Image (cartoon, rainbow, N blue to C red):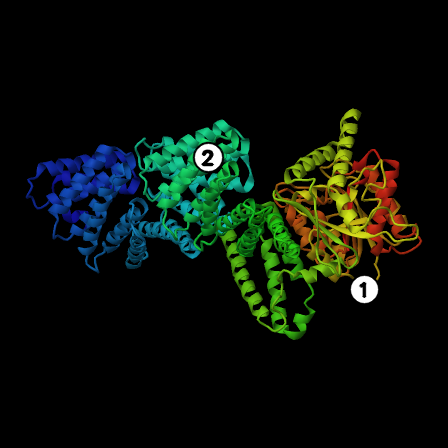
Amino acid sequence: MLLTDLFKARAKRKRLVARMASFEQTGDMTALIEAVQVGRELIASVPPDHPDRGAFLFLTGINLKRLSDRSGEPSLLVERIQVSREAAAALAGGEIHASALTILGGALLAMFETTGDPEQLAEAVQVCREACAATLPDDPDLGASLTSLGLVLRMSYEHIAGSGEDILAEAVQVSREAVQVSPADHPERGLYLSNLGLALRASGERTGDEDTLAEAVQVTRDALAVTPAGHPWHAKYLANLGMALLRLYERTTDADFLAEAIQVTQDAVLRTPADHPERDIDLGVLAPALLQMFMRTQDPTLLAKAIDTGRDAVMAVPPDHPRRAGHLHDLASALRTQGQETGDADILAEAVQVSREAVTTVPIGHPDSARYLSNLSSTLWELFGRNNDLDVLAEAVRAGRDATRVIPAGHPARANTLVTLGIALTTLYEQTADTHALAEARAALAEAAASVEARTLVRITAGEELGKAALTGGDAEAALSAFEDTIALMGRSTSRRLSRPDREHNLGEVAGLGAKAASAAVQAGRPERAVELLEQVRGVLLAEAMDARGDLRELHTREPGLAARFVRLRDEMEAADHSNVWGKPAETRIVGTGPAAQRIAEDRRRLAREWESLLGEIRLRPGFSGFLLPPPIEELRRQAADGPVVVVNVSRFRCDALILATGTAVRVVELRGITYDSVIEQANRFVVATNAAGSGPLRQRRANQQEIHAVLGWLWDEVAAPILQDLGLTGPPEQGQSWPRLWWCPVGEMTFLPLHAAGHHSHRPQTVLDRVISSYTPTIRALRYARDHASDSSPTQALIVALPDTPFAPALPGAHTEATLLARLLPGARTVTGAQATRDAVEAMLPEHSIVHLACHALSDWVTPAASRLLLHDHATNPFTVAAISRIRLSHAVLAYLSACSTTAGNQRLADEAMHITAAFQLAGYQHVIGTLWPINDAAAVRIAADFYTYLTEEGQAAPRTERAARALHHATRQLREDSTDSPDLWAAHIHAGI
């Protein structure tokens, strides 16, 4: 109804019209306050039966809504409800009765949001139902009635105990109808879309359906698209989008969604005045989003911001406000994380206090009470880990039990509560030997692992904890079954629908899973299965790339059409993996936002769906049922044809060497002298000593060398010696006999220790170097890949890349010496130095040379291993990273010698993924790669390289016999050791990887 139809002549009415119009056009609060006052005066000036009284009440109710929404003043809200009730009564049966009821429903909802009184929300639902019933199908206000009903129904589902899923389904339905009945240019379309987005988000949270959450995101984007930036609700829609994106991230682990959630919510905070009564909502979205991003990046500033934002959200609402409990929950989560990171028991104690307050703020049975109780349980468990107070652990168990009692079966979040309870109960068993606690823990974890509604990473965590609990209780068969089921889920968390950084993050989340699974298999008497599981769960991305580049001749012959599709999709997906919108290497960025990033992500998901469908189609063809699937033990054992492969597995449950040799079963050498903790301790000692061995005062350098020797001795006594004893390698080969070969395949933290150099080097031959030629392989499948890529032709010309002077890096004079020596030993070699040695130039020359020697600096990136790189001349603008090297495909590559620091170094989270420069060259196609485990001395690097090539070329008299690469490195290492026994950092860093 037009305002001009309501007010014709009187000055006061005209003044009301003018003030309302002024506010609607400019947002001028003075005009709104005056409009409210004029409305009050008009209501007071007419008798109860005046024909215009209902209209005055109606318009004043609208203005009171606007004013109370902005000011948050409780008295205004009370007045708003009173005026809206009178308006609805006065307009009963009239043209705008339905609109009056809708206004009243909104006022009751606002009061519920302030007081938390469920009766007010129940009345709001009833009033909004009456409004819909009173609205004719062709009424232009039908959309307003429907969207209001959808809003209060959703709130009822979220806040009233006992509200069923049918309430939520109805909320989605009527919210969708509101959008459908409103024309595209309707002035309230943004509101209708936003409310639909809220309902869809709630539905997606309840069902765990990614498509529903994705629709919630898209619908809220649409709401923003039709709402001008200066609109009073624009900031609210931004916060709604942020929450939808955050929930979609939690379900998919796609960090692009998380980055955008932070971006739009920060924008919402900036657009919302500091005294706005709903600013806490924006802060309440931003705080958990920042915490999640900290979990991805480990950036401490993000954790600090998450805590500060969480405190601001708590302070932004009164102590009795219904939203305060949620803000306390988020703050407790951030504080718990800070306590975990710092080990500070005081911070954890504060987290417990805040979490307890959140729990006591809502009644048991409240829809959010399970979440708050589970958070309290988890925080108490963390605190117990610091103070060992059994009363704290007992309270953690009680809170966990309470959480599982109040959350219904089938709810996606139930698995989270069950995992928290299961972990606390397992700890209780470890402390008290209470078998009932362990049985309860296993039951809880089994239910969580089997929950199809739960997020994949939650199910994986549940399955891993279930396997650990079973092993703790001595049930190896049940543990093995749990681990097998868990490993089968990993494909979902590493789907190619996700970006490469997201997949790497998810793999880091399950670090150590393979080692535990292998321990369970060995404990159950199935060592062959242990090897298969390790191959299935380790080197996942490496194996994926190697398998996709594997031998496709049979597929081309028998199924040429499928082979062509396979090659096309493979190449498109590899390109999509590294697509970005910044013009910088994709591996150096974690996330992206905006339309371009969204298009790239959607292309990636589309290609992944096609890829999954194609693989399923290929595997249905006769003879291809195992296409690109992990190989069975029979295939793995064949890779030991030239010498045994020794998998060294370490977990908290047991430590073993698994020996693969042809013609025999997998042999187990139990390493009784080591534990997981002792391996961590020795690895830390070793990394510290090797990183510092080449610098500092002489006394300190000598102390570091002694530390290195001590670790090498321990490694011999407890690991290498028992293995070599089992293999019958009790001394050097007899005169005239060939040196035996052995391939080390270390698992997890063992990758940080130099098995090839283990020994007491002042008491030879109590060393690995004096008994066997060592090579390394990240996985057994990688060994197969190298052999499959073996070239029948002789090595062609060598390429020598040397950078004695590199921009933004220290001088490396040995690189020039190295290049000069090698040029004499490798006649016809092409040497590239200085400004000519750019990434593009080197990449272009690699296919023309089967041997490449790179003498340069390298940078190992601990945080983002895929960004580790060789420092070529243009490294600052066009870095030669692990990701870039991995994309290269060479058909005649034989030997890559990386005379650079730490090319085989990775980080602990991704230790099993072999995400380093050495493995990248293996993936590119090189059968032999010489890499380094730690920073190398310039002069020692020259000496090792010279001895290596001298041996390989018979002192420059023959073409390099690359098949002797492992032998040549073994020879060069022993030669330098003879001259520098006391300095193992000089001679033990180089390793051979490959065949």
Quick check: 315 above or below 98?
A: above
- The picture quadrant where one finds residue 7 is top left
Residue 339 appears anywhere in the view = yes
User: How many tags in the picture?
Assistant: 2
Tell me the crowding category of disc 1: few under 14, some 14 to 19, or many 20 or more residues within 10 angstroms, Cα based: few
Screen quadrant of the C terminus: bottom right
Query: Which amino acid type corresponds to the residue marked 1 in the rendered image?
Result: Asp
- The picture quadrant where one finds residue 718 is top right
Q: Nearer the viewer, residue 168 or 107?
A: 168
First in sequence: mark 1 vs mark 2: 2
Tell me the crowding category of disc 2: few under 14, some 14 to 19, or many 20 or more residues within 10 angstroms, Cα based: many
Residue at 46% in and 38% down: 378
Q: Are marks 1 and 2 in contact (CB under 8 Å)?
A: no
Counting from the top left corner in percent of width and height, residue 324 is at: 35, 35
Camera-near label (1 vs 2) is 2
For residue 895, side relative to residue 684 (left or right): right
Query: Which amino acid type corresponds to the residue marked 2 in the rendered image?
Result: Leu
Residue 648 appears anywhere in the view = no
Counting from the top left corner in percent of width and height, residue 951 is at: 89, 49
Q: Dot 1 corresponds to which residue? A: 792
Q: Dot 2 corresponds to which residue? A: 393
